[in-house]
Image: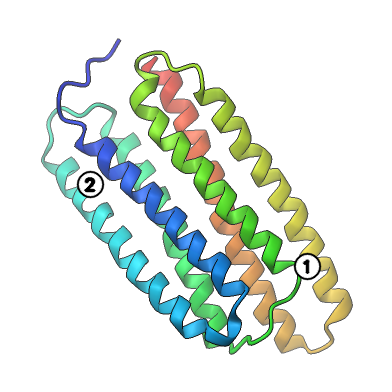
Amino acid sequence: MLKLGKDHTFFDLLESQAKTAVRAAEVFSALVLDLKNVKTHTDKLIAIENEGDDFTHKLQTKLSGAFITPLDHEDLSELSHLLDDVTDCIEAVGARIEMYKLTESRPDIIPFAANLLDVTKVTEEAVAELRSQFQKSDTIAGVLVRVHTLENESDRQYRAALTKLFDEVTDPISILKWKEVYDRVEFAIDRCESIANLVENMTVKYA
């Protein structure tokens, strides 16, 4: 079994990145319920995204100067970038809603945003499991299954949302605006599944 030593900074930073993604998803869930005050929420998303960038920078800087790391450099770097992608994408979708002046939510964006929040929370659990996996944690498999289940549900929500959008909305500009919103939410959720796949590969590699 790989010995981690006393320096758990990499795990601390990865978990901070995962928590940042959860916070962004929480703000986004609030935003879609309160489009009349979109600027308040997007300002929060910008601040959260900046914090996430800071964690990413700290991890990459530490990684570049470290000779011995608890996991492969490539794995740590990829996981960090994927986590940063989730937060970046959530901030970007909030920015699009503000930029496109979408002042009234569509009903299907609310459960879609809730699913995004759920999957970021489970992704946070998956990242936290990296510490205990080296002590033969038996919970990681269940956590990863939950990520995949939520991603499958998001696929159904995404397809249903687009179907209703094309059926109900006649203005092509409105269709394009809302489609981009749905696309970016779906991309953020897909990134969470990519994180789950990477964590799964890492737990096999380092078991």
169 with respect to 141 (left or right): right
The picture quadrant where one finds residue 185 is: bottom right
Which numbered dot is residue 102? none
Q: Is 33 placed left or right of 158 in the picture?
A: left
Viewer-side residue, 163 vs 13: 13
Q: Residue 173: x and y, percent?
A: 71, 88
Look at the image and tell me in which quarter the C terminus lies.
top left
Q: Which mark is residue 162?
A: 1
State the colouring used for the structure image.
rainbow
Q: Position of residue 88 (x, y in %)?
A: 42, 63
Bin the neighbour count of mark 1 within 10 Å (Cα to Cα): few under 14, some 14-19, many 20 and up: some
Mark 2 highlights which residue? 59
Residue drawn at (42%, 49%) of the image: 82
Q: Amino acid at mark 2?
A: Leu
| Label 2 or label 1, whichever comes before in sequence order | 2
Q: Residue at x 78, y 59 (%)?
A: 159
93 is higher (above) or lower (below) than 99: above
Q: Secondary structure at mark 1?
A: helix
74 vs 82, left or right, is left
**Quarter assignment of residue 62:** top left
Task: Residue type at mark 1: give it.
Answer: Leu
Residue 89 horizontal/vertical position (percent): 48, 64
The relative height of residue 185 versus residue 192 in the rendered view (above or below) is below
